[in-house]
Image (tube, rainbow, N blue to C red):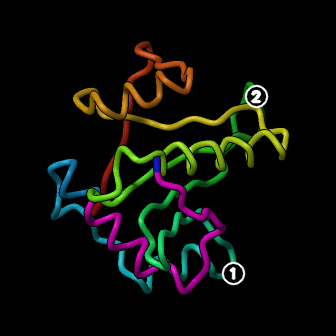
Protein backbone atom coordinates (compact mmCIF):
# COMPACT_ATOMS: atom_id res chain seq x y z
CA UNK A 1 0.00 0.00 0.00
CA UNK A 2 1.35 3.38 -1.02
CA UNK A 3 0.28 6.53 0.76
CA UNK A 4 -0.39 9.54 -1.39
CA UNK A 5 -1.34 12.95 -0.13
CA UNK A 6 -4.94 13.81 -1.01
CA UNK A 7 -6.05 17.40 -1.27
CA UNK A 8 -8.68 19.56 -2.94
CA UNK A 9 -8.00 20.16 -6.64
CA UNK A 10 -6.86 23.60 -7.76
CA UNK A 11 -6.66 25.44 -11.08
CA UNK A 12 -3.03 24.43 -11.44
CA UNK A 13 -4.07 20.75 -11.30
CA UNK A 14 -6.31 20.83 -14.37
CA UNK A 15 -3.55 19.74 -16.77
CA UNK A 16 -2.72 16.70 -14.65
CA UNK A 17 -6.40 15.90 -14.16
CA UNK A 18 -7.10 16.04 -17.90
CA UNK A 19 -4.13 13.77 -18.56
CA UNK A 20 -5.64 11.17 -16.21
CA UNK A 21 -9.10 11.61 -17.77
CA UNK A 22 -7.62 10.83 -21.18
CA UNK A 23 -5.84 7.80 -19.71
CA UNK A 24 -9.19 6.60 -18.32
CA UNK A 25 -10.84 7.06 -21.72
CA UNK A 26 -8.18 4.85 -23.28
CA UNK A 27 -8.72 2.22 -20.58
CA UNK A 28 -12.47 2.33 -21.21
CA UNK A 29 -11.86 1.85 -24.96
CA UNK A 30 -13.05 5.37 -25.88
CA UNK A 31 -9.85 7.35 -26.38
CA UNK A 32 -11.47 9.63 -28.97
CA UNK A 33 -14.48 10.48 -26.78
CA UNK A 34 -12.77 13.13 -24.61
CA UNK A 35 -13.61 16.59 -25.94
CA UNK A 36 -12.91 18.53 -22.74
CA UNK A 37 -9.94 20.86 -22.86
CA UNK A 38 -7.94 22.53 -20.13
CA UNK A 39 -9.74 25.77 -20.98
CA UNK A 40 -13.22 24.24 -20.73
CA UNK A 41 -12.35 22.49 -17.47
CA UNK A 42 -10.96 25.70 -15.98
CA UNK A 43 -14.17 27.53 -16.90
CA UNK A 44 -16.44 24.71 -15.74
CA UNK A 45 -14.56 23.99 -12.52
CA UNK A 46 -13.40 27.44 -11.47
CA UNK A 47 -15.61 29.89 -13.36
CA UNK A 48 -18.46 32.02 -12.08
CA UNK A 49 -20.73 28.98 -11.53
CA UNK A 50 -18.49 25.95 -10.94
CA UNK A 51 -20.01 22.69 -12.15
CA UNK A 52 -17.57 20.27 -10.53
CA UNK A 53 -14.95 19.90 -7.84
CA UNK A 54 -12.21 17.33 -7.43
CA UNK A 55 -9.60 15.87 -5.17
CA UNK A 56 -6.12 14.98 -6.33
CA UNK A 57 -3.79 12.32 -5.00
CA UNK A 58 -0.12 13.24 -5.21
CA UNK A 59 2.94 11.06 -4.87
CA UNK A 60 6.30 12.83 -4.91
CA UNK A 61 4.70 15.98 -6.42
CA UNK A 62 3.11 14.02 -9.29
CA UNK A 63 -0.68 13.85 -9.62
CA UNK A 64 -1.34 10.10 -9.66
CA UNK A 65 -5.10 10.13 -9.09
CA UNK A 66 -8.22 12.26 -9.12
CA UNK A 67 -11.78 11.98 -7.86
CA UNK A 68 -14.10 14.37 -9.72
CA UNK A 69 -17.58 15.00 -8.33
CA UNK A 70 -20.52 17.37 -8.47
CA UNK A 71 -23.78 17.95 -6.64
CA UNK A 72 -27.17 16.84 -7.85
CA UNK A 73 -30.65 16.92 -6.44
CA UNK A 74 -32.96 13.98 -5.81
CA UNK A 75 -36.67 14.72 -5.70
CA UNK A 76 -36.98 12.04 -3.01
CA UNK A 77 -33.79 12.52 -1.01
CA UNK A 78 -32.59 16.11 -1.54
CA UNK A 79 -29.01 17.16 -2.14
CA UNK A 80 -26.68 14.34 -3.21
CA UNK A 81 -23.14 13.97 -4.46
CA UNK A 82 -22.37 12.31 -7.79
CA UNK A 83 -18.89 10.86 -8.12
CA UNK A 84 -18.19 11.22 -11.82
CA UNK A 85 -14.85 9.44 -11.87
CA UNK A 86 -12.02 8.12 -9.80
CA UNK A 87 -8.93 7.81 -11.97
CA UNK A 88 -5.60 6.39 -10.87
CA UNK A 89 -2.63 6.36 -13.25
CA UNK A 90 -1.98 2.86 -14.49
CA UNK A 91 1.40 2.49 -12.77
CA UNK A 92 -0.12 3.48 -9.41
CA UNK A 93 -3.20 1.22 -9.40
CA UNK A 94 -3.67 -1.49 -6.77
CA UNK A 95 -1.74 0.55 -4.17
CA UNK A 96 -4.62 1.91 -2.09
CA UNK A 97 -4.80 5.34 -3.72
CA UNK A 98 -8.28 4.71 -5.11
CA UNK A 99 -9.47 3.88 -1.60
CA UNK A 100 -7.91 7.07 -0.23
CA UNK A 101 -9.74 9.18 -2.83
CA UNK A 102 -13.00 7.26 -2.50
CA UNK A 103 -13.05 7.59 1.28
CA UNK A 104 -12.20 11.30 1.05
CA UNK A 105 -15.20 11.93 -1.21
CA UNK A 106 -17.39 9.83 1.08
CA UNK A 107 -16.21 11.82 4.11
CA UNK A 108 -17.06 15.04 2.30
CA UNK A 109 -20.58 13.83 1.47
CA UNK A 110 -21.15 12.70 5.06
CA UNK A 111 -19.74 15.92 6.54
CA UNK A 112 -22.20 17.92 4.43
CA UNK A 113 -25.06 15.67 5.56
CA UNK A 114 -25.91 14.77 1.98
CA UNK A 115 -28.60 12.18 1.37
CA UNK A 116 -26.38 9.88 -0.67
CA UNK A 117 -23.35 9.50 -2.88
CA UNK A 118 -23.73 7.73 -6.19
CA UNK A 119 -21.74 6.85 -9.28
CA UNK A 120 -21.67 4.48 -12.24
CA UNK A 121 -19.43 1.59 -13.17
CA UNK A 122 -19.12 -0.25 -16.46
CA UNK A 123 -20.49 -3.78 -16.25
CA UNK A 124 -17.29 -5.25 -17.72
CA UNK A 125 -14.96 -3.44 -15.29
CA UNK A 126 -14.62 -6.29 -12.81
CA UNK A 127 -11.77 -4.71 -10.85
CA UNK A 128 -13.84 -1.55 -10.23
CA UNK A 129 -16.90 -3.60 -9.28
CA UNK A 130 -14.84 -5.58 -6.77
CA UNK A 131 -13.35 -2.33 -5.43
CA UNK A 132 -16.84 -0.93 -4.78
CA UNK A 133 -18.06 -4.19 -3.25
CA UNK A 134 -15.07 -4.10 -0.90
CA UNK A 135 -16.33 -0.70 0.25
CA UNK A 136 -19.84 -2.16 0.78
CA UNK A 137 -21.44 -0.18 -2.06
CA UNK A 138 -24.92 -1.07 -3.27
CA UNK A 139 -24.75 -2.05 -6.92
CA UNK A 140 -28.18 -1.41 -8.40
CA UNK A 141 -29.12 -3.55 -11.40
CA UNK A 142 -32.67 -2.21 -11.54
CA UNK A 143 -32.08 1.23 -13.09
CA UNK A 144 -30.90 1.78 -16.66
CA UNK A 145 -28.78 4.71 -17.80
CA UNK A 146 -30.51 6.95 -20.31
CA UNK A 147 -28.98 9.92 -22.12
CA UNK A 148 -28.87 12.16 -25.15
CA UNK A 149 -25.59 13.30 -26.63
CA UNK A 150 -25.13 16.25 -28.95
CA UNK A 151 -21.36 16.16 -29.27
How busy is the neighbourhood of tag 2: few (under 14 within 10 Å), some, or many (20 plus)?
A: few
- The residue lying toward the viewer, choosing from 133 and 60, is 60
Element under disc 2:
loop
Q: CA distance from mark 2 to mark 1?
A: 27 Å
From this view, report whether residue 141 is shown above or below residue 79.
above
- Residue at x 54% of width, y 86% of height: 12
Q: Residue at x 54, y 61 (%)?
A: 4
Q: Does 89 appear in magenta?
A: no
Expressed as whole percent of the image width and height from the top left, the position of residue 7 reads 65, 67
Q: Which residue extends farthest top?
A: 142
Furthest toward the front, the residue is 1
In the depicted structure, whether residue 64 falls above or below residue 116: below
Q: Quadrant of residue 151?
A: bottom left
Left or right: residue 100 compared with residue 19: right
Q: Secondary structure at mark 1?
A: loop
User: Mark 1 sits on what residue?
Assistant: 48
Instruction: Work out whether residue 106 or residue 113 is closer to the camera in this orientation and state it.
Output: 106
Side of 116 where 113 appears, left or right: right
Instruction: Find the magenta span and give its range.
Output: 2-23
Mark 2 lies on residue: 77
The numbered mark, 2 or 1, whose residue comes first in the sequence reads 1
When the figure is inspected, residue 84 is found, relative to residue 49, above or below; the finding is above
Closest to the observer, 145 or 95: 95
Q: In percent of the image, x 61 and y 54: which residue is there?
A: 70
Amino acid sequence: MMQASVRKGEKSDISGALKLIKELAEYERQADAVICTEESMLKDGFGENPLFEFFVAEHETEIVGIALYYYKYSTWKGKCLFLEDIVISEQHRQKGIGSQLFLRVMELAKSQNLARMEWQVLDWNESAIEFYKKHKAIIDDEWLNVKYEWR
